[in-house]
Amino acid sequence: MAYETILIEQRGAVTLVTLNRPQALNALNGQVLSELLDAMAAFDKDASQGCAVITGSEKAFAAGADIKEMHAQGFADMYGHDFFAGWDAFTRTRKPVIAAVAGYALGGGCELAMMCDFILAADSAKFGQPEIKLAVSPGMGGSQRLTRAVGKAKAMEMCLTGRMIDAAEAEHAGLVARIVPAADLVEDAVKTAATIASMAPLAVLANKEMVNAAYETTLAQGVQFERRLFHALFGTADQKEGMAAFVEKRPGNWSGK
Ligand code: HXC
């Protein structure tokens, strides 16, 4: 599939995806969704790739779902086609995905960043759920993921007023993993992704799966799920290699088995 709204670059074991609709501040329309889903499926299947980074431009990660695409739609279009349900497939990407956010991450842009496994924010980043100003609401999971990330008080204030928060507030609230100078954002994110891609692949999948389980389970179920996956990793060749490499004071050489 040839892409028009995203750019793909492989940097070693890292797939760098750049949202590329500068004229619309990377607003997310149906074409972006289908190209991104295609790219993520290819990334997941490609054994040479271990981690992905999604980024935008200096001005905008993404300024939201495409308002011009949505504005004429009615209830029957939205409900009948389960509009935005396609984005759920993005969250089923099995390998890790980092959002590298500079500039605006608003509405669907903030929601896409939150669908990634963690967010690295440039000091220029601004996050918000301004849909209320359009007389609608988050529709790609924002009311749920933001609330889980920053707690009810801040999520409620942001959704009800549309107020944007800057990178420092986002980091303080737990929405982003780290703040990076804007000029270093992509390099830092790719380096972080390369570190992840250098780990044993099955352990990477298991760690992602168990952290995500914390969102879906009770504490006891989550701890049980973690322990079972931990036990399962002792059935891998890479666990033998990883522990032998530690004892022999050398780097691990992973087989992915
Ligand atoms: C379509 C958009 C867009 C969007 C910006 N553009 N955001 N097009 N959908 N979400 C377009 C503008 O129309 C304009 O195109 C061009 O990008 C540049 O934007 P400007 O507004 O001229 O830039 P600036 O003055 O710098 O302001 C930046 C901004 C503003 C503060 C980010 O663009 C803005 O408020 N955008 C909308 C943010 C928003 O409401 N997002 C939530 C969307 S709803 P032209 O052709 O005029 O030059 C959403 C919903 C999820 O995500 C679920 C709801 C159902």
Image: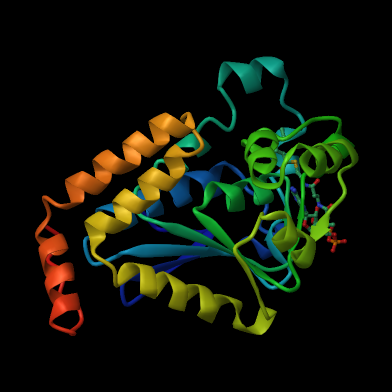
Quadrant of the snapshot with the N terminus = bottom left
Q: Is residue 121 left or right of residue 124?
A: left
Identify the residue shown where x is 51% and y is 59%.
Answer: 4
**Image quadrant assignment for residue 22:** bottom right
How far across and down, in percent of the image, does residue 183 sit? 65, 84
Quadrant of the snapshot with the C terminus = bottom left
Identify the residue shown where x is 52% and y is 45%.
Answer: 33
Q: Is residue 68 left or right of residue 191?
A: right
How far across and down, in percent of the image, does residue 63 sit? 73, 54
Identify the residue shown where x is 66% and y is 15%.
Answer: 76
- In this view, 24 is above or below 181: above
How far across and down, in percent of the image, does residue 70 sit? 71, 34
Q: Is residue 19 visible?
A: no
Please state the total of marks drawn on the protein image: 0
- In this view, 245 is above or below 112: below
| Viewer-side residue, 120 vs 18 | 120
Q: Which colour scheme is used?
A: rainbow
